[in-house]
Amino acid sequence: GAVVSQHPSWVICKSGTSVKIECRSLDFQATTMFWYRQFPKQSLMLMATSNEGSKATYEQGVEKDKFLINHASLTLSTLTVTSAHPEDSSFYICSARDELGDTHFSNEQFFGPGTRLTVL
Amino acid sequence: GEDVEQSLFLSVREGDSSVINCTYTDSSSTYLYWYKQEPGAGLQLLTYIFSNMDMKQDQRLTVLLNKKDKHLSLRIADTQTGDSAIYFCAESGVRNFNKFYFGSGTKLNVKP
């Protein structure tokens, strides 16, 4: 149980276009999901916390107008990279907490496999 | 901000023990975690330790926490080729236990 999927797994786009990445909790509900960005050989950096039915909370230095987050249901959060530029190329990873589950550590975050974004 | 550091690579022979080290700076860390990332897969929680513990053992995994030195280690006994992956340590603090700070990951290569 507690599987998180992401779609697409990789995407290549032209500079100036927008790209939407989906994060789904497949077998549990998640009121809170998290979006991370990972550069090569670097750690995951938390970008924002996605809250179901309300606005996302962005970390300092992350442009909320650039990285639009929508968490419209208990199983889906989307990250849209608007007007993408080459410097936005990165590996984007989402995670979710199974807040209602009672079979594992309550603070565990379940991670998706990531989306590789390349902006030409 | 909080800083979590790890060495980038570790190479061991199958059957040997592996020790992956991590240092962190936030003295208010509440939980410390070890995650494993295999190619094409998401991060998988291996184990975690609460900050008031010194050691935690789970089958082949032993976590040691030296809170004074802010040093965390993961020991994998009898390392197998299937243990080859990237291992991330992470911490979350009392102020916001949802906010994880990750190290850069240690790539473990297990040679047969």
Image (spheres, grey):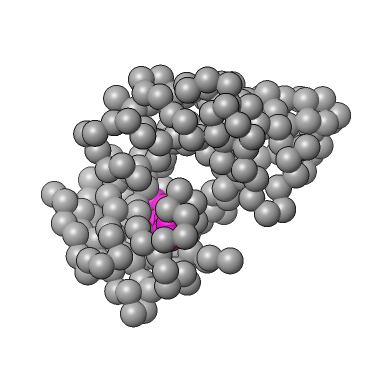
From this viewpoint, is residue B91 visible?
A: yes
Q: Position of residue B18 (x, y in %)?
A: 27, 59
Q: Position of residue B110 (x, y in %)?
A: 31, 49
Give the residue furthest to the left: B59
Give the residue furthest to the right: A16
Choose top left, top right, bottom left or bottom right for residue B69: bottom left
Q: Position of residue A93 (x, y in %)?
A: 54, 36
Q: Is residue B89 magenta?
A: yes
Q: Nearer the viewer, residue B52 or A3?
A: B52
Q: Quadrant of the N terminus of chain A?
A: top left
Q: Does residue B50 appear to the left or right of A99 in the view shown?
A: left
Q: Which residues are magenta?
A: B87-93
> Residue, x 42% and y 53% (percent of image)?
B97
Q: Does residue A65 appear to the left or right of A22 in the view shown?
A: right
Q: Main secondary structure of the magenta part?
A: strand
> Residue, x 68% and y 23% (percent of image)?
A20
Q: Nearer the viewer, residue A26 or A120?
A: A26
